């Protein structure tokens, strides 16, 4: 070993190897290679982890299962039986014959999860002291609860002619889109004035100009208050207005991208001594100026109620909006659907066994 380096010796340079040798001489480093240890264990045929489950070829038996409180009486097997890929053996034959599953099989180590194995897993977790281990009865009830929440998406219907149809409820599919935050916040609830630009469904001129009033978005939310079409409202300036249609536009200089602003197309209303008078000429105002809802104005009017002039009675007959009463203080949305159909044949001759599919797409999504 080279002599230790002396700081006071005046040496200007010291080889790095000499410093490392001194450091290594002062310390003992112990490194355990756990990977090599696991490999040696596997090569010797020993089990790395202990398990309460017997080998796959053995018959699994649990005595006194009822005493564990894991399986209720008449509990059905909710395991999913899956055939091994490339195998022609039926599920029933496999379960009775105890077919050995290769370690290279995608479904290794089991091709199914029967009730006995479910109980074994729960028993194993309980014996290890895991907290709050559910029973099989609780698992079954939870599965039923999830099915009630999510519903069965596809319903099988057989016609009198014998033709079989599989239907998905459109309302449930749309409700799932609204419940999913990934799709909900991407939706565009109002048609947009693209000013000649069109890249999405809500940019279409039909959605903006030619959509019937009954299919247009019926309401808008401003500062937690909901305003419906055909209902009198008051603006922050004190003026009155009746909205007939809501739409959005990007009010920004060219080349800049901004969030769209929601506007309202409707009638200006004047308050007179004999009641409210509606101007037949329509104007456009931003919804951000909305201040008092129709319900607020009706509450302020008291027993006398909101009165309109004789020339404006037709507008009064539309108040309140039926959807406003039906919604119970919640937003109401209209969802355009894009529907198209295709047919697929399972045979070479297309006149037999045709498969007709009708697709529906949520038009609010970009």
Image (cartoon, helix red, strand yellow):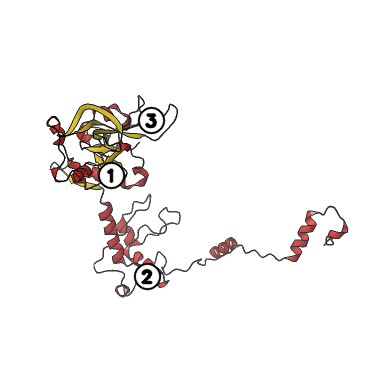
Q: Which badge, 2 or 3, comes first in the chain's sequence?
A: 2
Crowding near the residue tagged with mark 1, few <14, some 14–19, many ≥20 C-alpha atoms within 10 Å: some
The numbered mark at residue 225 is 1
| Residue drawn at (30%, 72%) of the image | 69
Residue 331, quarter of the rendered image? top left
Q: Give the foreground label among 3 and 1.
A: 1
Binning the other alpha carbons within 10 Å of mark 2 as few (below 14), some (14 to 19) or many (20 upward) gives: many
Instruction: Indicate the secondary structure of the residue bearing disc 2.
Output: helix
Q: Quadrant of the C terminus?
A: top left
Rendering quarter of residue 208: top left
Can you give x and y, in whole percent of width and height, for residue 71 in the image? Answer: 29, 69
Circle nearer the N terminus (3, 1): 1
Q: Distance between the Cα atoms at labels 1 and 2?
A: 54 Å
Q: Is residue 228 left or right of residue 286?
A: left
Q: Which of marks 1 and 2 is nearer the N terminus?
A: 2
Q: In which quarter of the image is the N terminus?
A: bottom right
Q: Do the residues labelled 2 and 3 touch (CB within 8 Å)?
A: no
| Mark sitting on residue 93 | none
- 1 or 2: mark nearer the eye: 1
Horizontal side of 60 relative to 309 (left or right) equals: right
Between circles 2 and 3, the one closer to the viewer is 3
Most distant residue in the right direction: 9
Task: Rate crowding at label 3 as few (under 14), some (14 to 19) or many (20 or more) other CA atoms within 10 Å.
Answer: few
Q: Nearer the viewer, residue 252 or 110?
A: 252
Tags 3 and 1 touching, CB below 8 Å: no
Residue labelled with disc 2: 123
Q: How far apart are marks 2 and 3 (CA)?
A: 65 Å
Asked whether residue 168 appears in the rendered view, the answer is no
Looking at the rendered structure, which numbered label has been put on residue 251? 3
x, y percent for residue 135:
32, 67
| 363 relative position to 20: left or right | left
Residue appearing at x 24%, y 31% in the figure: 266
């Amino acid at each position: 070993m080279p002599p230790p380096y002396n700081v006071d010796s005046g040496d200007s340079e010291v080889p790095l190897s000499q410093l490392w040798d001194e450091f290594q001489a002062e310390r003992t480093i112990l490194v355990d290679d756990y990977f090599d240890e696991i490999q040696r264990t596997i090569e010797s045929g020993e089990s790395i982890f202990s398990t309460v489950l017997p080998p796959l070829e053995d018959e699994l038996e649990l005595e006194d299962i009822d005493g564990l409180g894991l399986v209720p009486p008449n509990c059905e097997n909710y395991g999913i039986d899956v055939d091994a890929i490339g195998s022609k053996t039926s599920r029933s034959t496999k379960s009775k014959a105890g077919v050995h599953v290769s370690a290279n099989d995608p479904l290794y180590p089991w091709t199914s999860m029967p009730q006995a194995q479910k109980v074994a897993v729960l028993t194993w977790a309980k014996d290890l002291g895991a907290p709050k281990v559910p029973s099989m009865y609780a698992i079954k009830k939870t599965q039923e609860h999830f099915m009630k929440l999510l519903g069965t998406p596809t319903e099988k219907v057989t016609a009198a002619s014998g033709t079989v149809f599989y239907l998905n409820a459109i309302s449930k599919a749309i409700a799932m889109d609204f419940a999913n935050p990934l799709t909900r916040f991407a939706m565009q609830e109002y048609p947009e004035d693209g000013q000649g630009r069109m890249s999405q469904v809500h940019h279409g001129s039909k959605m903006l100009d030619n959509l019937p009033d009954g299919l247009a978005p019926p309401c808008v939310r401003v500062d937690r208050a909901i305003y419906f079409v055909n209902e009198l409202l008051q603006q922050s300036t004190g003026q009155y207005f009746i909205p007939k249609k809501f739409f959005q536009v990007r009010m920004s200089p060219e080349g800049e991208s901004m969030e769209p602003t929601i506007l309202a197309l409707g009638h200006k209303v004047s308050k007179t001594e004999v009641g409210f008078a509606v101007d037949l000429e329509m104007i456009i105002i931003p919804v951000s100026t909305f201040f008092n809802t129709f319900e607020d104005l009706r509450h302020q009017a008291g027993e006398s109620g909101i009165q309109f002039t004789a020339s404006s009675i037709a507008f009064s007959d539309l108040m309140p909006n039926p959807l406003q009463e039906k919604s119970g203080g919640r937003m109401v949305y209209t969802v355009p659907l894009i529907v198209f159909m295709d047919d697929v044949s399972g045979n070479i001759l297309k006149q037999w066994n045709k498969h007709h599919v009708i697709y529906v797409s949520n038009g609010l999504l970009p």
